[in-house]
Image (cartoon, grey):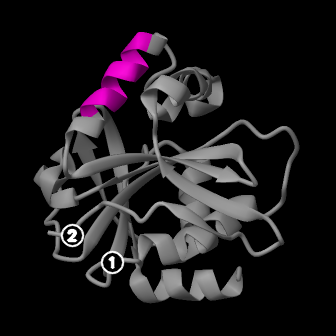
Amino acid sequence: MTDARLVEGTRPFGDGRTLGVRLLDLDRDAPLVHSWVREERARFWGMTDHTEEQVREIYGFVDSLSTHHAYLLSLDGVPVALLQTYEPAEDPVAEAYPAQPGDLGIHLLLAPASSHEPGFTPRLIGALGPVLLGNPDVQRIVVEPDAGNERALGLLARLGCELGPEIDLPEKRAQLAFLPRAALERLTAAHA
């Protein structure tokens, strides 16, 4: 089992900005996260019809688990994404695929962008690489976006993810994908 807890703090983003990683603070962040998950572009997140209180309850539950964590990512103090990490062996996804030692599951929801920044998501993943790989036991990143989310699937291919099978989860038909440690290290080096 791989610990899904990340080290909070800041690190260079690779273009002069600073990436911040901190645990989600429900009192401070629930209204912001609620505004993000209600947007149509976040429909694959499955919360477009949720109230702020429901979002708060969901992330309160996540916060109560030792195997799942939620983080707010920021650039120079401006929130840019919600990152969730989890231990696949301790998640419903383990019922659909054989979780391996060294697997670290993630979910990433980007904030609405005020302007288009080409290549932003790969740079963000590259900057997160050292954070995600801070635990030497992590051997691959596991993601399972909605199988119908073509944008996410295209991004995963560009990042170097290896596609696994489509699986049925309680809330969706998902596409398993794996990003091996070496591929994330290369992505990190390319965006340093």
Count residues near mark 2 (Cα–Cα under 10 Å), then give few for <14, some for 14-19, many for 20+: many
Q: Against 138, is 49 above or below?
A: above
Residue 35 horizontal/vertical position (percent) = 61, 22
Q: Please name whichever residue, 6 or 183, is drawn nearer the observer in this view of the structure.
A: 6
For the residue marked with disc 1, what is the amino acid?
Asn
Q: Quadrant of the N terminus?
A: bottom left
Extreme residue in the right direction: 115
N-term-proximal mark, 1 vs 2: 2
For the residue marked with disc 2, what is the amino acid?
Thr
In the picture, the disc for residue 135 is: 1
Residue 175 is drawn in which quadrant?
A: bottom left
Question: Which residue range is magenta in the image?
Answer: 53-61
Residue 14 horizontal/vertical position (percent) = 75, 75
Regarding mark 2 in the picture, which secondary structure is present there?
loop
In the picture, the disc for residue 2 is: 2
Q: Please name whichever residue, 95 or 33, is drawn nearer the observer in this view of the structure.
A: 33
